[in-house]
Image: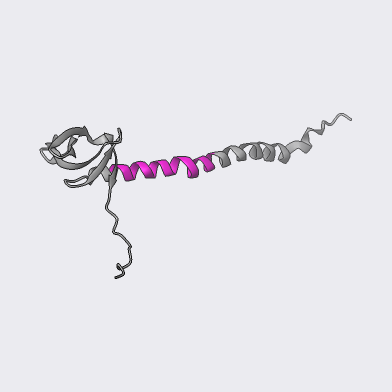
C-alpha cells in the first residue's frame, strides 16, 4: 500500500513521446519531397537556362512579350573576367529592340522538329 504504482510507467512514457513526434517528422518529409525539393530543382534549371542565354534564342518575358535575343551584354566582374550582364537586348518586332532584365525572362522557346509523315502525292 505504501508503494507507488509509478514504476510501471517506464517504457510507455518513452514510446508515447516518440509516437507523438513521428507524425511531425512524416509531415516535414512529405512537404520536402512534394513542395520544397521540386521548387529548388526548378529554380536551378531556371538559373542554368538564363546563364546559357545566347543570341538568336526566342524568349518570353514576364510580361508575355515574345522576342529574339539580339545581344547579351558582357560586363567585367571584380577579377576582370567577362561575365554576362543583367541586361539583354531583345527584338520584339522588325527593327524594334528593347532592353530587358535577364531575370524577367521566364522561358526560352526551343524549336521542336516536326514529326510529320512524308507528304502523300
User: Could you say which is closer to the camera, residue 113 or residue 76?
Assistant: 113
- Give the side of residue 15 with respect to residue 37, left or right: right
Quadrant of the rendered structure where residue 89 is?
top left
User: Quadrant where the C terminus lies?
Assistant: bottom left
User: Could you say which is closer to the camera, residue 84 or residue 29?
Assistant: 84
Can residue 91 be seen at all in this image of the molecule? no
User: Which residue, as the protein is rendered here, is positioned at the far front?
Assistant: 121
Quadrant of the rendered structure where residue 4 is?
top right
Q: Main secondary structure of the magenta part?
A: helix
User: Which residue, as the protein is rendered here, is positioned at the far left?
Assistant: 80
- In x, y percent, where is residue 53? 21, 45
- Give the side of residue 84 with respect to residue 50, left or right: left
User: Which residue, as the protein is rendered here, is positioned at the far right?
Assistant: 1
Q: Residue at x 18, y 47 (%)?
A: 56
Q: Residue at x 14, y 38 (%)?
A: 73
Q: Residue at x 31, y 42 (%)?
A: 46
- In x, y percent, where is residue 1? 89, 30
Colour mode?
one colour
Q: Which residues are magenta?
A: 28-47
User: Could you say which is closer to the camera, residue 120 or residue 38?
Assistant: 120
**Count the marks: how many?**
0
Residue 4 drawn above or below residue 66: above
Q: Residue at x 51, y 40 (%)?
A: 31
- In x, y percent, where is residue 51? 23, 43
- In x, y percent, where is residue 103? 26, 35
114 drawn magenta: no
Quadrant of the rendered structure where residue 104 is?
top left
Amino acid at each position: 500500500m505504501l508503494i507507488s504504482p509509478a514504476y510501471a510507467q517506464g517504457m510507455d512514457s518513452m514510446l508515447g513521446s516518440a509516437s507523438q513526434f513521428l507524425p511531425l517528422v512524416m509531415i516535414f518529409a512529405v512537404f520536402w519531397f512534394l513542395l520544397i525539393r521540386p521548387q529548388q530543382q526548378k529554380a536551378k534549371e531556371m538559373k542554368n537556362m538564363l546563364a546559357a542565354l545566347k543570341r538568336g534564342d526566342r524568349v518570353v518575358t514576364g510580361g508575355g512579350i515574345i522576342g529574339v535575343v539580339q545581344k547579351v551584354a558582357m560586363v567585367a566582374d571584380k577579377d576582370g573576367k567577362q561575365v554576362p550582364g543583367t541586361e539583354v537586348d531583345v527584338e520584339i518586332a522588325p527593327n524594334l529592340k528593347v532592353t530587358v532584365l535577364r531575370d524577367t525572362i521566364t522561358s526560352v522557346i526551343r524549336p521542336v522538329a516536326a514529326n510529320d509523315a512524308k507528304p502523300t502525292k
